[in-house]
Image (tube, rainbow, N blue to C red):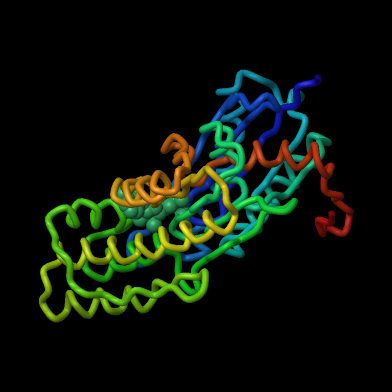
Amino acid sequence: MIILICLGIEGTAEKTGVGIVDSDGNILAMAGEQLFPEKGGIHPRIAAEHHGYWIPKLIPKAIDEAGISYDDLDLISFSQGPGLGPALRIVATSARTLALSLNKPIIGVNHCIGHVEVGKLDTGAVNPVTLYVSGGNSQVISHESGRYRIFGETLDIAAGNCLDHFGRETGLGHPGGPVIEKLAKKGSYVDLPYVVKGMDFSFSGLLSAALRKVKKGTPIEDVCFSLQETAFSMLVEVTERALSHTQKDEVMLCGGVSANSRLREMLKTMSEEHGAKFYMPEMKLCGDNGVMIAWLGLLMYNQFGPLDIRDTGIIQR
Ligand code: KG4
């Protein structure tokens, strides 16, 4: 079988990345850059400027790292969404420019499914129920009855966003997740709202309540501990229900929040109680990266073929 090589461009939020993968699943290159806001959250325009600056530098870097020439590329893939509008436009424009100038086919892919597919590639999981938790997304995803389906998701902000916002408001810095994890080790439980509605979860009320506790003088360690326990229990509950609904025997965790050892422990315990195997990709593949976009691009290209770039400038399938 002919081996195809795909270059993928990611940049849905504060990270941008370029990955090169072949259709045997070999990762040939992985280059990336992250925006660290001076204060506050991620401003979509600043993220777009960041990606616009870095993508033209990351592409030749990845080509170099892969030891190939531009001619060796068979496909250009880009993350089509979900993400910050201005950042997505930069990613799409960069991919389109590259594809047109090299006269190569192009394909747009779903960012969240990219996380799932690269996770499967890395871990060997075949068809898991996936908990994908990052700064911008929180979803329970599984491939069921012929297509990917979202079994549960956040009704408002993502779990990582909840941690980051808490970190910023309390002076712990950005990103909040790693600092909160550290402080939580010294904390004990205080009551916080637990919100699971049907198969969905909600984090904005939890965030407000946690901030109120800090303002009223509850030790920050206790609030960090309780914030983690509450948010993660909500995520695990919905994953557990999706697992028993689908009767699958694999669970996978991915996204930046999977760096958290407490979340890993909770999800692993739940999986094992149900006789399911627990998987987590290598940490460098858990966060946003170009490799997942290149790999999903290859899978989708084999299934559906490329996008049609008309001279109107509108990308159509
Ligand atoms: O997937 P990711 O790298 O990128 C975006 O979503 O943009 O995820 C970043 C998220 C941030 O919200 C960050 O706070 C969270 O991952 N994170 C963690 C930890 N390390 C990173 N959350 C909890 N515990 C950690 N140790």
Q: Is residue 164 above or below residue 295?
A: below
| Quadrant of the frame with the C terminus | bottom right
Quarter-of-image position of residue 86: bottom right
Q: Is residue 260 left or right of residue 254?
A: left
Q: Position of residue 196 (x, y in %)?
A: 43, 73
Q: Position of residue 57 (x, y in %)?
A: 56, 37
Choose between 242 and 188: the one closer to the eye.
Answer: 242
Q: Is residue 81 above or below residue 73?
A: below
Q: Identify which residue is drawn at 51% across, 56% down.
A: 13
Q: Identify which residue is drawn at 50% across, 58% down.
A: 47
Count of numbered tags:
0
Choose between 225 and 19: the one closer to the eye.
Answer: 225
| Quadrant of the frame with the N terminus | top right
Q: Is residue 16 left or right of residue 97?
A: left
Q: Identify which residue is drawn at 61% across, 18% down.
A: 67
Choose between 78 and 133: the one closer to the eye.
Answer: 133
Q: Is residue 3 above or below residue 105?
A: above
Q: Is residue 283 left or right of residue 120?
A: left
Can the viewer see residue 57 in this picture?
Answer: no
Q: Position of residue 267 (x, y in %)?
A: 38, 50
Choose between 310 and 151: the one closer to the eye.
Answer: 151
Q: Identify which residue is drawn at 53% across, 43% down.
A: 249
Q: Position of residue 106 (x, y in %)?
A: 78, 43
Q: Is residue 304 above or below residue 26?
A: below
**Residue at the outermost right position:** 311
Can the viewer see residue 47 in this picture?
Answer: yes
